[in-house]
Amino acid sequence: MPRIGLALAFVLLLSGCASHSSLIIQPYSELSIEVPNEMFSSVKVRDAELLFLRNDRIIGFVKSDEIPSTVSTGSAIDTSSTLFESAEQGSNKPVWIERIPEARVFGVVQGEFRTLFIVPDNHAQSLITFQGPTESSTSIRINGEKISY
């Protein structure tokens, strides 16, 4: 009898998750980015980028870049602060995104797109960039925390 109950619970869990599934991107073991499936219809890899497409049109991407040694200071806090200060020089002001464990994150909204800049705590020489439509990118989760700003 317990096996039947467990099997039924598993089936219900799967059916409930199917409509709310996400693509989980894990550039490092301590960093995961969850992108809801309803944000895109397909994914394509090009060069060092993962592209999100909707109806064969690119609507976003995730990529990883090495931060030059002139910017990378050895700590994620200092490196992300330097990048944030540089972003402040642009016409659209960046906003820190708090509560993200294991990473320093800030974002910029420009027109219909939101760009998130992520410096993992244990990889201060790496910059992960996510860009997606403003209206659906609020459903993105980084290390389990929903993006809100």
Image (cartoon, rainbow, N blue to C red):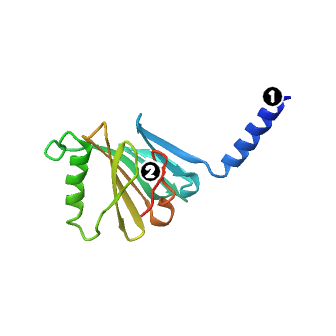
Under mark 2, the amino acid is Leu
Under mark 1, the amino acid is Arg
Numbered mark located on residue 139 in the image: none
Quadrant showing the N terminus = top right
Q: Which residue lies furthest to the left in this view?
A: 70
Q: How many marks?
A: 2
Left or right: residue 131 versus residue 91 is: right
Q: Residue furthest right?
A: 1
Q: Where is residue 73 in the image (x, y as percent from the top left)?
A: 17, 42
Q: Which quadrant would residue 31 be assigned to in this image?
A: top left
Residue underneath mark 2 = 51
Q: For the residue carrying disc 1, how many other residues have a C-alpha within 10 Å: few (<14), some (14-19), or many (20+)?
A: few
Question: First in sequence: mark 2 or mark 1?
Answer: 1
Left or right: residue 3 versus residue 45 is: right
Q: For the residue carrying disc 2, how many other residues have a C-alpha within 10 Å: few (<14), some (14-19), or many (20+)?
A: many
Quadrant showing the C terminus = bottom left
Which residue sits at x=54%, y=51%? 42
Using the numbered discs, state the Cα–Cα distance from disc 2 to disc 1 in whole angstroms.
42 Å
The residue tagged with tag 2: helix, strand or loop? strand
Residue underneath mark 1 = 3
Which residue sits at x=49%, y=46%? 144
Q: Position of residue 78 (x, y in %)?
A: 21, 47
Q: Which quadrant would residue 7 be assigned to in this image?
A: top right
Q: In this view, does 88 lie above or below 6?
A: below
